[in-house]
Image (cartoon, rainbow, N blue to C red):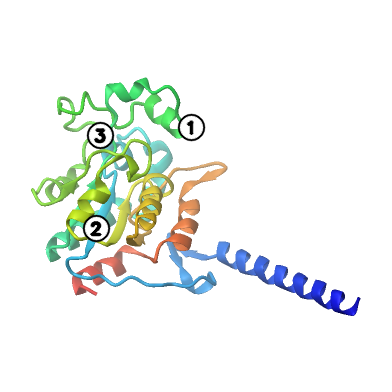
Amino acid sequence: MKTLSIQVSRNKMRTSAIALAATAALAMSVIGGVVHADNSGLPDPGFEIVHGKTALLVTDPQNDFLSPEGVTWGVVGKNIQANGTVKHIDQLFAAAKATGMPVFVSPHYYYPHDHGWKFEGALETLMHKIGMFNREGPLSTTGLEGSGADWLDQYKKYINDGETVVTSPHKVFGPESNDLVLQMRKQGIDKVIIAGMSANLCTESHMRALVEEGFEVMVVTDATAAAQVPGYDGYQAALINFRMIASHVTDTKSAVAAIMAGT
């Protein structure tokens, strides 16, 4: 009985330790929209930029997310403004271009045939209902200029420079339905810096998929944003998962400095 009592006591201590570790991981310090690893109790593997092996990936840098005229601005606008998301994505684009770092953009488009889907998730239904990312067809750019599916105007000089790889569109949230992984593998990329929209949806889904495909991933937490409505804080949800899954998370200032230094 004494041995059993000691074993039970040890089990309780072990359970308590696990519970405390889990609580610490979830109670990470978030300052200015950036997750700080020092209070999380989680390891920080870090991320080294290697020339020719590292790329910048920007998800959905489009008007429907990032413009005040976009259809989602009412729920994402405050978080975008608080994080300085538009400016920070611009700074990452500029740094990558200045150093010759490969840049990939994974866009989100819906064509008329996509509206014939027989079932959808909650936010797929919402996106289709509000006409988000709508285009006339895969081979037509009629009506694209200035539409919700178009690039935010200030990013066009980076994306349309003839060097940026614009992948085929992803259709739900992650890159499983487009050619992002193929395009990166063909350029010898195995390390990815991720920014763009929306934090807990397309950005997080791209992070998860790339990690599963064997890429090393860093997320720039103030170069993204998400919907924040009563009971649903998409940004805070994303910050927790970024920290738990990516090799490293950082802010734009640190990311730009690292890109410019090449380390």
**Residues tagged 1 and 3 counted as in contact (Cβ below 8 A):** no
Q: Residue 111 lies in what quarter of the image? A: top left
On the image, the x and y values in percent for residue 2 come to 89, 79
Amino acid at dot 1? Ala
Classify mark 2: residues with Cα within 10 Å, few (<14), some (14-19) or many (20+): many
Of 184 and 72, nearer the camera is 184
Query: Residue 70: x, y in percent?
Result: 31, 35
The residue sitting at 83% across, 78% down in the picture is 6
Would you name the residue on which mark 2 appears?
56
Query: Label 2 sits on what residue type?
Result: Leu
Q: What element carries label 3?
A: loop
Amino acid type for the residue under numbered disc 3: Ala
- Element under label 1? helix
Find out whether the residues at labels 2 and 3 contact each other: C-beta distance under 8 Å.
no
On the image, the x and y values in percent for residue 49 come to 25, 70
Look at mark 3 in the image and give the residue it sits on: 149
- Relative to residue 148, is residue 31 depicted above or below? below
Which comes before the other along the chain, label 2 or label 3? 2
Label 2 secondary element: strand
Q: Mark 1 points at which residue?
A: 122
